[in-house]
Structure formats: structure tokens, C-alpha cells
Amino acid sequence: MGSIARASAWVGAVACIVLMALVVANVILRFTWKSIPGTLDVTESLMLVITVMMLAYTQIKRGHVKVEFFTNFLPAKPRQGLGLFTLILALGFTTFLTWQSWRVALLALRIQDASGTPPFIPFYPAKLILAIGISILCLQLIFDVWQETAKLFRRRTGETLAASSENR
């Protein structure tokens, strides 16, 4: 799963470079000749690509915002259980988001959704990338829930085995 998330992060990084080049070129051309048509629509789509393609990699690195003020005072097991609960909530929300983003993306593809002004930049590729990025995050969250569940029960099983061997 990590390689898929890393590949999607690279897609986001390349989109960031393209976005920067497009904005710089548009600014320079605006003052010297004429701005690039459709820059606003393309920039909006590229910002979406940058954001959603980085989500799964950020989850791997545990880079999403966490408020640990109260959980730092908890013992290790309840803190780990609360972390698992939070991951399950995130997975539920992300699953719903995945489902809805695919519905929107497929509708946009079917109607060939595009901007309303010339040069009529298509929006459906960005909506498909949104669905793909959220799906990758959903898969990463499934993997994380699986790992955290195994870790939580492995510790309990290990402690139970250690306690039973001491009683012998």
C-alpha cells in the first residue's frame, strides 16, 4: 500500500511544479503580452490534484493534525484504543466520501463536465482524480485500522501469555 501512496504523492508533487510554472508564466505573460486562457480553471484543478494525491502519503507519515492534549494523560492501552476508534471514524467518513466522489466523478464524465467559458477546460479529469485520491486514502486507512487492531490485540495476547507462564 505504501508504494501506491508514494506514487500518488509524486503525482501531487509534479502537479505542484506544473501549477507553479503555469502561474509564473501567466504572470509574466500578463505584463508582457496576454495572459494564458483558462489559467484559473487549470489552477483550480491542479490544486485539487495536489491536495488529494498527498492525503494517503500524509496518512502513512501520520502527518494529519491530531489533538493529543487529553490523550497524553491516558495509559498506553486506552490511548491506543482511542487511536483505533479515531481511525475507524476516519475510515467511515472516508468510505462515504469515496462513494460520493465516485458518483460525482462518473456523472461528470458522462456529461463531459467543463468550464462555462472559453477555452472550456474539462472538469471531469479533476473529479476523477479526486475520487482516485480519496480511494487511495480509504485503502490506506483500511490498512492502518488492520495494523492498529492487530497491534492492540497482539499486545493483549502477549501479556496474557506472559502472565500465564509466570503463574506456572
Image (spheres, rainbow, N blue to C red):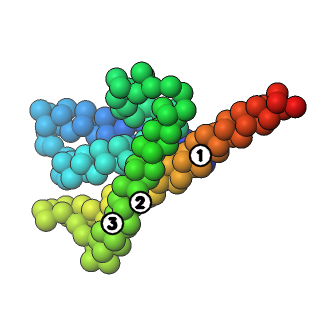
- Which of pointers 1 and 3 indicates the residue nearer the eye? 1
Q: 81 above or below 93?
A: above
Q: Are marks 2 and 1 in contact (CB under 8 Å)?
A: no
Give the residue at mark 1: 149
Residue 95 quadrant: bottom left
Q: 118 above or below 11?
A: below
| Residue 134 as seen in the image, left or right of residue 19 | right
Q: Which mark is residue 100?
A: 3
Q: Are marks 2 and 3 in contact (CB under 8 Å)?
A: no
Q: Which mark is residue 113?
A: none
Estimate the spatial distance between the alpha carbons at disc 2 and disc 1, rounded to whole Å.
Answer: 18 Å
Give the residue at mark 2: 95
Circle 3 — which element? helix
Where residue 6 appears, as percent x and y from the top left, is: 55, 41
Residue in the picture at 18% in, 48% down: 40
Where residue 106 appears, as percent x and y from the top left, is: 35, 73
Residue 120 quadrant: bottom left
Q: Tell me which numbered mark, 2 or 1, is placed earlier along the sequence.
A: 2
Where residue 18 appears, as percent x and y from the top left, is: 36, 40
Question: Which amino acid lies under the numbered mark 1 shown in the image of this protein?
Answer: Thr
